[in-house]
Amino acid sequence: MTIEGARPGAAAVSLAPGSLLPQVGHPVTQQTIAAYARASGDHNPIHLDEDAARAAGLPGTIAHGMLSLGLLTSTVEGWVAGRGRIARIHCRFAGMVRPGDILLCRGRVGAAPPDRGRIVLELEAVTGAGVRALTHASATVELAGDAAGANQPDPGSGRDGD
Amino acid sequence: MALNPACVGRHYVGALQVVGAERARRFAEAIGSDGRAPGAVPTLAATYLLAPVVDLLFGDDEVGLDLARLVHAEQTFEFLRPPRLGESLLPEGTIARVETRRHLEVLQVDLCARDRSGSAITRATTVFVIRPGAPPPPEPGG
């Protein structure tokens, strides 16, 4: 379902402090939303029923915020690619994601060197139309033994977007 | 309807949740996980922790939630260890904060999933915001 950006895990993404993480786009369709409703048990009609969503004052059905957070979390797992595990993830649900949108997940490894084998990824998810869906997002990744030792600052990495 | 500040400290214990392999697989597929990581994806916690506690919270009339105006505003998960497939977990949550900021009411719930030994394996903080309702109709002649 990932359609654009570097495919997470296709090549080792640098987790060195300051590294930019490759953007990954996830198409969100009404089918995606329905599948998440079935898997999560959240059948709130604002996600599934166009009329009910409009009656609630929305422009139409919207994706579950937790679906967006799930997609962002999957993206992080792809970037980390077995070199550690997500110990913490946080976000604010700032904007609506609607069927037909593409959720673009972006991130950067925090500038601080690993603290006790942990790195912090600064994250965001925006729609292709520019709606900031998830803001103030971050993930703390606990690096596995080898990755923690190897994860020293890379002088040639990241910060291109500054 | 307004949030009842006296509900701070109210505690909810959900039904025991089994982290089944099929449940984990379906959820992983729904969020685009490629299945590379073994076991349950982290945000499966939405099903074994968040949903059972929130269902109890939403059914508690004394809290004063207006579900039609409720927005999930913020979410944090802390994963102390991944759940094992087949493991049973007990979800619980406590209303930690009720406050009014400008026109918004804010409710925070702190959650925890415990294994059979009582050890916490996942903690979470969920913040809901209640949007302002429509203004009351003007007084006749006013």
Image (cartoon, grey):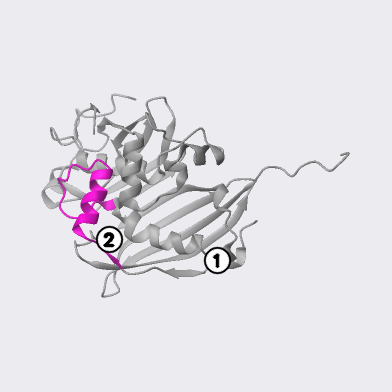
The relative height of residue B16 versus residue B23 in the rendered view (above or below) is below
Q: For mark 1, what is the residue?
A: B8
Above or below, comparing residue B37 to residue B124 in the picture: above
Segment tinted magenta in the rendering:
B17-42
Residue visible at 21% across and 51% down in the picture: B25
Q: Residue B122: give its label.
A: none
Q: Nearer the viewer, residue A94 or A102?
A: A102
**Pointer 1 chain:** B
Visible residue check, residue A87 = no
User: Mark 1 belongs to which amino acid?
Assistant: Val
Membership of B25 in magenta stretch: yes
Using the image, tell me which numbered label, if any, was put on residue B80.
2
- Of the two numbered discs 2 and 1 in the rendering, the one whose residue sits closer to the viewer: 1
Which residue ends up furthest to the right in the rendered image?
B141
What amino acid type should be assigned to the residue bearing mark 2? Answer: Leu
- Is B36 magenta? The answer is yes
Residue at 24% from the left image edge and 47% from the top image edge: B28
Q: Earlier in the sequence, mark 2 or mark 1?
A: 1
